Image (cartoon, grey):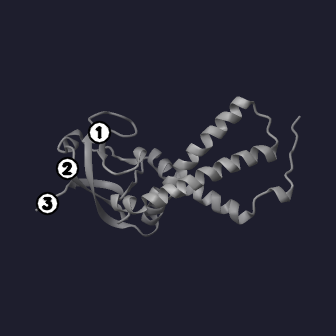
Amino acid sequence: MSENISIPPSKTLPKWLGYSFGFLFILGCCPAIAQKFGHQFLASPDWLSQTRIIAMGFACGFSVLLLWLTIKGMKIRGQNKSKFVKGLTYLFAPFFGYYIGFTIVALGLPMLGAVIVGGNTEVTYTVTKFEKRRNRSCSNPITLERLPFVHNELCNFSAEFGGKFKASDKIVVVGKGTKLGVFPKSARRFDTE
């Protein structure tokens, strides 16, 4: 027998707040989802260095907000979960909120700009290392400096091309985007001449 639980209107969030939170949540998830489906996005190192403090502040605020919404939602819905499940949920929510909040500013905003107004562009990065390996999601990754942990690899280039790079070499990534970030299509060694 299923029982419908109705939430009194006074205990729900205003619609504009719910839509705003939903939009920001989706914007924070977009880079990971796009990467999962093979559309890698790299934010520019300049954008990341200019917005690092803003991104960290937004991440802290978003982690607190997500924890608060989780606690409030479980109380309003009257979910009788075990203490273990509640503890795991309360422990996981701030970390997930921090990741989403940081990603909104660091990757989501430049990605949105690249999708809406992006054209053919070039962004220069510094190589940390090259690793020759076969992987379904990221073959022969060229790891790039000053990028967020999960989104710091340039993927699916040949081992011959990647083998030309060593730590501190410069690489120019070409693709659709803006000066804030790029969806890589090709890459070349940076010419200092």
Asked which secondary structure carries label 2, the reply is: loop
Secondary structure under the numbered disc 3 in the rendered image: loop
Residue placed under numbered mark 3 in the picture: 192
Q: Seen in the image, is 170 located left or right of residue 91?
A: left
**Is residue 131 visible in this depiction of the protein?**
yes
Q: Nearer the viewer, residue 106 or 50?
A: 50
Residue 96 position in % (x across, y down): 57, 45
Q: Reading the chain from its start, which is encountered first: label 2 or label 3?
A: 2
Q: Position of residue 113 (x, y in %)?
A: 45, 66
Q: Amino acid at mark 1?
A: Asn
Could one spot residue 181 in this view of the protein? no
The local crowd at label 1, few if under 14, some if 14 to 19, many if 20 or more residues have their Cα within 10 Å, is: many
Residue at mark 2 to residue at mark 1: CA–CA distance? 16 Å
Specify the quadrant of the image occupied by residue 161.
Answer: top left
Q: Looking at numbered disc 3 in the image, what kind of residue is underneath it?
A: Thr
161 and 89: which is toward the camera = 89
Q: CA distance from mark 2 to mark 3?
A: 11 Å
Q: Position of residue 192 (x, y in %)?
A: 13, 60
Q: Earlier in the sequence, mark 2 or mark 1?
A: 1
Q: Which residue is mark 1?
A: 140
Q: Which mark is residue 22?
A: none
Seen in the picture, residue 172 relative to 132 is either above or below; the reply is below
Q: Disc 2 designates what residue?
A: 169
In the image, is 23 to the left or to the right of 191?
Answer: right
Residue 31 position in % (x across, y down):
47, 52
**Amino acid bearing label 2:** Asp
Earlier-in-chain disc, 1 versus 3: 1
